[in-house]
Amino acid sequence: MQWLEARQRPGAALILAALLAASVPMRAPAQTPQPAAAPGYHIVMVLPHRPENTEAGFQDYLLKRNLNVKIDTVVYSGRAEDGPATVEKVRALAPDLIYTWGTGTTLAMAGKHDAGPDQHIRDIPIVFTEVTDPVGSGLLRQTNPPGRNVTGVSHVAPVAVQLNAMRGYLPFKRLGYITNPAESNTVGVADELRRMAGGEGFELLEAALPLDASGQPQAQALPALIRGLRERGADLLYVGPSTFLAFTHRDLVSKTAISEGLPTFCATESIVRKASCMFGLFANGTNVGRFAGYKAAQILVDKTPVERIPAESLQRFSLLINMGTAKALGLYPPLALLNVAEVVQ
């Protein structure tokens, strides 16, 4: 049973298995002309971090398709002022396709759908992963069809589904949430939580990261913000789909929450698996990458125009529990969840 179908009682989050296709090259006799080599494709990955399981899934799909692909990686700092230089670096590599991770990185490369083309890439196909809300962020006017040179795969479960998963583990009355004004998707999630709070029967406690003079969020403020939410009575800290909170500073966020005795629910995978978030519900990163690889193959091999390929979300989600954190907080999961969740220590 999917979480979306489980309003009356906790349900199961199912892991989506991607279908991989493979082909085997044939060897021609020595005396006959060799068949033409498979066409080569050049992909540039633009990442705000080192490659992780999403990128591994993307490359794994292309490998299983036996595609002749060269992949270069360009690191994006995440700072808006570095966007134009990163665009120029990518353009100089002359890729056939660009892979991006995250809302900020994708916007830096592609720009908003209604922005001018001067500093963004409008003439090379872009396939994104880990973009929370491509329409709400302004990346796309619509997802099907996207109508521009951008498509991709989102990873976040609907907020209503996440709330249902939270209650399956830990009923709560006050939900803490930190926004990063430099990440538009975190602000969009806050707007949605405010709209839902009354009908869902909880109080939303918000805190916002302060920004410096250049508009960058201040990580040193995080411990005080988390402590403040606990002092205001938060029963649970929701860490949304934020690169800054859930990836770059995932250790600081999750360890501070433990020190404050505040359980955490996270909308993305790595902060549960590689840091100390107590539990989370999301699309498995490897499967997100594989689905993005499928879309890349549609563009490169099948020659399907990128503007006609829907930007989509995976519809089934994985529940992950960090048992080390659960033990540290004395909050052991219900047996019903252990029957359907993946558990990490």
Image (cartoon, rainbow, N blue to C red):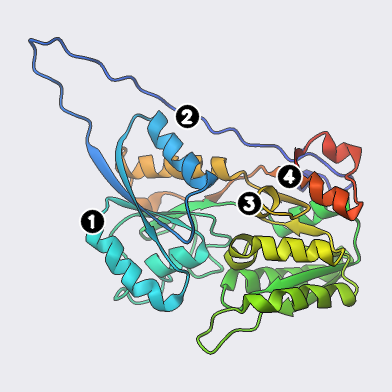
Distance (Cα) linking label 4 and label 1? 39 Å
Q: Residue furthest bottom?
A: 213
According to the image, label 1 marks what residue? 94
The kind of secondary structure element at disc 3 is: helix
Residue 332 visible from this viewpoint: yes
Quadrant containing the C terminus in the rendered view = top right
Mark earlier in primary sequence (3, 2)? 2
Pointer 4 with pointer 1, Cβ within 8 A = no
| Label 1 to label 3: alpha-carbon separation | 31 Å
Residue with the mark numbered 4 = 320
Q: Which residue is mark 3?
A: 270
Separation (CA) of disc 4 from disc 3: 10 Å
Q: Amino acid at mark 2?
A: Leu
Identity, as a three-letter code, of the amino acid under mark 4: Leu
Task: Say which amino acid is labelled 3.
Answer: Ser
Callout 2 secondary element: loop
